[in-house]
Image: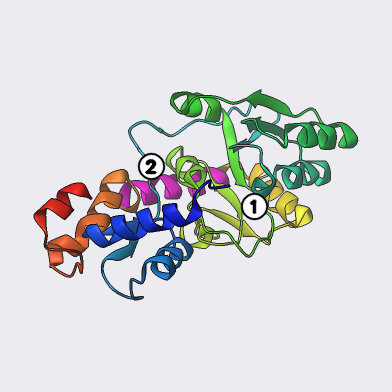
């Protein structure tokens, strides 16, 4: 909770008013900014630019198929990440695969309890620093973003971009901005949120067909290189300046402050 909410909104209005371009990772965030600052919808000052990925840092991984294939999740263990749904899906699996959960957080105990309840051996690595994420993805065949149903999915999940950059097919909930990144049937599979049966079936389908999984992963990697590097994010953010459509201030001092 903010100590000074009114002061924070005053600072937001001042900063947005001084900026030439305000980049927001999703339309809900852009709407929130417009609502609180009085910027009219459709103006060039507030632009929606989803997150991206460093494709030089995140490189394609090779799946380890010498044992049960690895299905990986990376992220903070919080209620809106749906990891308990993923554990429930693993318990419903009809093919053999191992679940690796990379991260830590307040839901860890709930995840461990769910795994114990279903008699599953889940690999919980704990939190890792960002530079170790590529190693955490090593050997995986499928990556998952199992977000539960929510009417407030306003964020742009970095994990989805990093999974794709690692050439991993992504099984994700059809929610928020995800369908714009995960191309269903081409770079991954989309499932209804909060549906462990559908989640299990989608993962099973890719685990049972490693060649299809690899083809989707390669398509995802190509999409990231083509459209979602941080260079693309920067270009999209600065595009209003290049076209002269920004509605920001012409005061050089204000521009420097932004």
User: Which residue is drawn at the image coordinates 58% and 32% (left, top)?
Assistant: 140
The residue where tag 2 is placed is 53
* Residue 12 visible, this orientation: yes
Q: In this view, does 235 lie to the left or right of 113?
A: left
| Image vertical order of residue 160 relative to residue 244, above or below | above
Q: Does the magenta stretch include residue 250?
A: no
Main SS of residues in magenta: helix
**Residue 67 visible in the shown view:** no
Q: In which quarter of the image is residue 151?
A: bottom right
**In-front residue for pair 145/60:** 145
Q: Quick check: 81 left or right of 31?
A: right
* Residue 133 on image: x %, y %: 49, 29
Which residues fall within the magenta stretch?
212-226
Q: Nearer the viewer, residue 82 or 86?
A: 82
> Mark 2 falls on what kind of element?
loop
Q: Position of residue 190 (x, y in %)?
A: 60, 58
Left or right of 74, for residue 208: right
Q: For the residue carrying disc 2, how many other residues have a C-alpha within 10 Å: few (<14), some (14-19), or many (20+)? A: many
The numbered mark, 1 or 2, whose residue comes first in the sequence reads 2
The one nearer the camera, 130 or 241, is 241
Residue 225 in magenta stretch: yes
Q: Residue at x 60, y 41 (%)?
A: 142
Q: Which residue is drawn at 66% across and 33% down?
A: 105
Residue 147's disc number:
1
Mark 1–mark 2 Cα distance, whole angstroms, equals: 20 Å
Judging from the image, what secondary structure is the residue with disc 1 in? loop
Residue 15 drawn at (x, y percent)? 29, 55
* Residue 52 to residue 124: above or below: below
Q: Which residue is drawn at 33% across and 57% down?
A: 23
Asked whether disc 1 touches disc 2, contact meaning CB atoms under 8 Å apart, the reply is no
């Amino acid at each position: 909770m903010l100590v000074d909410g009114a002061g924070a909104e005053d600072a937001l209005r001042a900063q947005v008013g001084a900026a030439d371009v305000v980049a927001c990772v999703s339309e809900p965030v852009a709407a929130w900014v417009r609502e609180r600052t009085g910027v009219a919808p459709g103006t060039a000052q507030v632009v929606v630019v989803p997150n991206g990925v460093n494709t030089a840092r995140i490189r394609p991984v090779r799946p380890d198929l010498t044992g049960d294939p690895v299905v990986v999740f990376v992220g903070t263990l919080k209620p809106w990440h749906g990891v308990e749904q993923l554990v429930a899906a693993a318990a419903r699996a009809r093919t053999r695969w191992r679940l690796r959960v990379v991260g830590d957080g307040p839901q860890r105990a709930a995840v461990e309890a769910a795994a114990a309840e279903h008699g599953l051996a889940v690999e919980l690595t704990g939190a890792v620093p960002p530079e170790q994420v590529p190693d955490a993805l090593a050997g995986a065949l499928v990556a998952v973003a199992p977000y539960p149903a929510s009417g407030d999915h306003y964020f742009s999940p970095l994990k989805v971009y990093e999974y794709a950059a690692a050439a991993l097919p992504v099984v994700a909930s059809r929610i928020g901005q995800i369908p714009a990144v995960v191309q269903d049937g081409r770079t991954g599979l989309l499932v209804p949120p909060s549906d462990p049966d559908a989640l299990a079936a989608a993962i099973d389908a890719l685990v049972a067909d490693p060649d299809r999984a690899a083809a989707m992963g390669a398509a995802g990697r190509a999409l990231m290189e083509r459209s979602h590097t941080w260079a693309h994010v920067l270009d999209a953010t600065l595009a209003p300046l290049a076209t002269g459509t920004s509605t920001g201030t012409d005061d050089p001092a204000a521009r420097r402050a932004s």
